[in-house]
Image: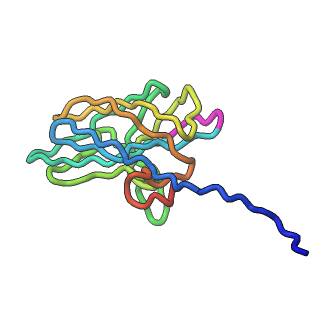
Amino acid sequence: MFFGATVFAAPVLAQTPEPAAEVQLGEITITGAFIRATMPRAPVGAAYVTMTNTGAQDDRLLSVTAPFGETVMLHDMVNHDGIIAMHPLPRGLPIPAGESVSLTPGGKHMMITGLTERLEKGQAVDLTLMFELAGEVTLRFDVLALNARRHPGVGNAGEN
């Protein structure tokens, strides 16, 4: 006698992350825009992006606005004698000619304060970036997991 179970296996489809949107504004190419999801009632959020200046002149990210927050500040993380602290960039963020500048968790970032809504994984939100030379652009930032390290369409997707 054979006592067995019939197992029906559905195929598991690998979900390929969408590539990060690429936006061209003058000589600035912007890729990998994402923002981390926030906990309920969190007062702040953080956004990240990579900006490449393909031009012959230095440019500067002067400011950022978000309709879902009171202010957006540009910050860098600075190590002072083993103590890491956020350092504001009140004059903006330089983007040297021919170079890329990446805003990443643990490094340079956009800090959104006074959040008016929770940011949940799977959403997309708009932020407006103002550059000294390239001008202004509103672009879509994908809301990723609380611990996301980079956009899944850029680099190692396993970390999101």
- The majority secondary structure of the magenta stretch comes to loop
Residue at coordinates 57% horizontally, 48% vertically from top-left?
146
98 lies left or right of 62:
left
Colour pattern: rainbow
Nearest the viewer among 10 and 140 is: 10
User: Across the whole image, how many numbered discs are drawn on residues?
Assistant: 0
Q: Quadrant of the N terminus?
A: bottom right
Q: In x, y percent, where is residue 118? A: 59, 32
Vertical order, 45 against 104 (above or below): above
Q: Residue furthest bottom?
A: 1
Q: Quadrant of residue 78?
A: bottom left
Q: In x, y percent, where is residue 84? A: 48, 58
12 lies left or right of 68:
right
Q: Quadrant of residue 43?
A: top right
Nearest the viewer among 104 and 80 is: 104
Residue at coordinates 10% horizontally, 45% vertically from top-left?
57
Residue at coordinates 37% horizontally, 48% vertically from top-left?
19
Vertical order, 122 against 78 (above or below): above
Nearest the viewer among 4 and 31 is: 4
Residue at coordinates 33% horizontally, 52% vertically from top-left?
102
Vertical order, 154 against 33 (above or below): below
Q: Residue furthest right?
A: 1
Q: In x, y percent, where is residue 51? A: 27, 46
Q: In x, y percent, where is residue 23? A: 27, 39
Determine if the magenta segment contains residue 157. Answer: no
Specify start and end residues of the magenta stretch as a single range: 40-45
89 lies left or right of 53:
right
Q: Residue furthest front?
A: 1
